[in-house]
Every structure is written in C-alpha cells, then in structure tokens.
Image (tube, helix red, strand yellow):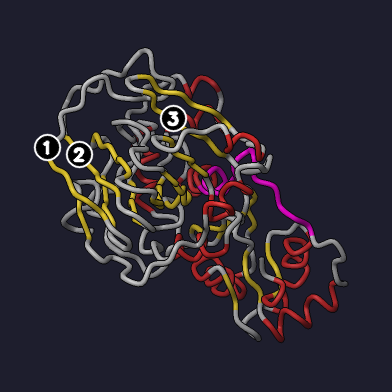
Amino acid sequence: MARYWQRRAYLIRGAIADFRDPVSLPMLQRLAARDDVQARVVMQDGARWHLEHGPFQHRFWKNLPAKRWTLLVQGLNLVVPGADTLLQRFAFIPYARLDDVMVSYATAGGGVGPHVDSYDVFLLQGMGLRRWRISTQPDRALDPHAPLKILRSFRPRQAWQLARGDMLYLPPHVAHEGVAIEPCTTYSIGFRAPDYAELCAELFADRFADRKLGSAYTDRGLRPTKHPGALPGRMIDGFADALRRRRFSRKTLGDVVGMVSTTPKAHVMFDRPPSPVSMRRFAAAAQAQGIQLDVRSLMLYFDATIYINGERIAPPARHQPKLRQLADDRALTARSVPAGMAGQLYEWYCAGWLHIAHHAT
C-alpha cells in the first residue's frame, strides 16, 4: 500500500497460489443468459472490433469463431458465492472503495484492446495464460471507429505472462492490454471513487453541482485497514474541500457519501424470503445461529450513523459496536446479534438484505 497503491503497477507472482476458478465456461454462459446479469462479448476481426451485449441465448455461442473473442461478466460476486469470497480477500481496502469482480473468459488471441481505466484494478489470473502489456504514455486518443474505448496508438513499455494465481495491480490511468495466449480466465477486482460533482448533482441543489469541484477522490498513501466497513474520514474531508466553503457539516457530508456509496446499482435486485418466518422466530434463530449480509448488500458506518443499501439509521449507542462489526465482517456470530435491534434486523431480513446464517445465499 505504501509503495504501489495509486502509484505504479505491481506484479505479484503466486498471489493466490491455490486459486481455483469459482466458475466454468458453461456457468458463465448460463449467467450471460440472465436479465439481471451484465454480460458483453468482444470480438476482433483483423483491425475491426465488434461488441455484443447480453443476455445471450444458447444459439449465440454456436455462431462464434474458434478464436479472438472474449466474454465479460460484470458483478460476478453478486451471483456466485465463490466470487464474493474472492472480493472479501481485498477488504484491506475500505468497502466504500471496493466495487465488484468482473470475469473475462477469452479464447486464444482474445482481448478487449489497449485501454485506460480511471480506477484501480487487480487482475487475477485463473485458468490458462494471458499476456499483459502496459504503458504510461500520455497519448490517450481513442480509436474513433471502435465500439469500445480502445486507444488509437499503444506503445507498451513492460510485458508479463500471467499463469494461474498470478496477479497484476494497476493504478488508474495506466494504459494496458491483455491478450489470451490460450483459453483463459481473468478476474478483475475493481474499485470505485466518488465523483464530487456527481454527489452534488445527486443530493444538493443544482447551483452546487455547477461548481468546478476537481477530480475524483484519490487515496495515495492509504494504509491497510482492519475495519473495512468504516467510511474513510479522508473521503469526507476531500468532499468538504471540494465544496470550497465549509457550508455543510461533516455529518451532513458523511450522510451524502454514506448513502450514495451504499446505493445498489440499478440492475441489482434483492430476493425476499418466499416464506419469511415471524419476527419472534427470526430473533430466536438469529440469536442461536447468527446472521450475515446478503452478497448484494452494501453496509458502511460513519461516526454514530449506519448506512445500508442507500438508507441510514442512527441506532442507540449500545447497539453501534455490533452493527459496526456487521459492516466490517458482513456477519454476526450466534449470540452476537443485539436483541434490542430485532425489529430493524427483521425488516432487513424481510427485504432480503440479510439472512439467518444457515439461510445465507
């Protein structure tokens, strides 16, 4: 974190030496057929690029060539428990910064072209081999004829071949290109940062959104955390600085960032329990078995306020430590559940936001 985070690329050989893919190609194809999963297929034919958006029916795969195509499935952690487990391994970064896991399945020669991302990313290699090339070139001009944001000119300076368990970290704005040497999978652990102008446009009057607030939040020098559920104070301070005038209290700005940071993406839907138990049975089961957040739930805290899925609550002081623990660990063990919060927790259970531990999905 001190040496590389948001500074320079970092290749980690054997980062997860025993890594096994949480999905297979048939599983990915089934996921890509669902309406609630974001999937794309990128194909290259000589110098021409083609992009198709899902859902994809079974017959689609039969018409693809043998080589030079890539299937991308976004938000894999929302639908595959093993991918959510993978995402939690990166909880040394605050959850307010963690975004999702995207998987790329590529046939030989497949890739999405040289491009630049505006966010941090860890690229973890699954099955097969992939070659990565990177550049810090200042030229960011895009190919006007490509359906994706592909660089018109790419001048690589470094190159590596990644095998299973190897991982490449890239800070924002590093040009890179990955090409499959053989059929392979790559898992992209992506991050997000609040755009201060967007926050103002979302929750404040238009007159505040018109200000020139500068670039998005950065956290160079960030240190590893043992409390990933805590909303970083420097994120709130950066927002305050961007507003130029300390017109709003830090608490108000915390509410803005907390609610926006925990609002699920538009396509995310929660599964309510088909036959919910009564609140009395829920409370007894929660005390005996524990609870855990749904993989789609986003929960943070700041000072005495808890934010979950775009909502905020101000629990009594005696319950705050356990709710913070739930945000950090995404679960509470048996008898750790605060009995006095049974009503609130039951509402979240009925909404599909959390589950009794043995019912977790």
What amino acid type should be assigned to the residue bearing mark 3? Met
Decide: marks 2, 1 in contact (CB < 8 A)?
A: yes
Position of residue 10 measured from the top left corner of the image (x, y, whole percent): 20, 53
Query: Does residue 299 appear in the picture of this structure?
Result: yes
Quarter the C terminus occupies: bottom right
Label 3, residues with CA under 10 Å away: few <14, some 14-19, many ≥20: many
- Badge 2 or badge 1: first in the primary sequence: 2
Q: Which residue is mark 2?
A: 134
Position of residue 126 measured from the top left corner of the image (x, y, whole percent): 38, 58
User: Please, what secondary structure does the residue beneath circle 2 have?
Assistant: strand
Q: Which residue is mark 1?
A: 157
Cα distance between the residues tagged 2 and 3? 21 Å
Q: Residue at x 70, y 47 (%)?
A: 269
Q: Residue at x 50, y 30 (%)?
A: 200
Cα distance between the residues tagged 2 and 1? 6 Å
> Which range of residues does the magenta coloring cover?
258-272
Is residue 145 left or right of 131 when viewed as pictured?
right
What amino acid type should be assigned to the residue bearing mark 2? Ile
Is residue 298 left or right of 287 when viewed as pictured?
left
Q: Which residue is mark 3?
A: 43
Closest to the observer: 36 or 113? 113
Is residue 112 left or right of 4 when viewed as pictured?
right
Q: Residue at x 66, y 40 (%)?
A: 58
- Badge 3 or badge 1: first in the primary sequence: 3
Label 2, residues with CA under 10 Å away: few <14, some 14-19, many ≥20: many
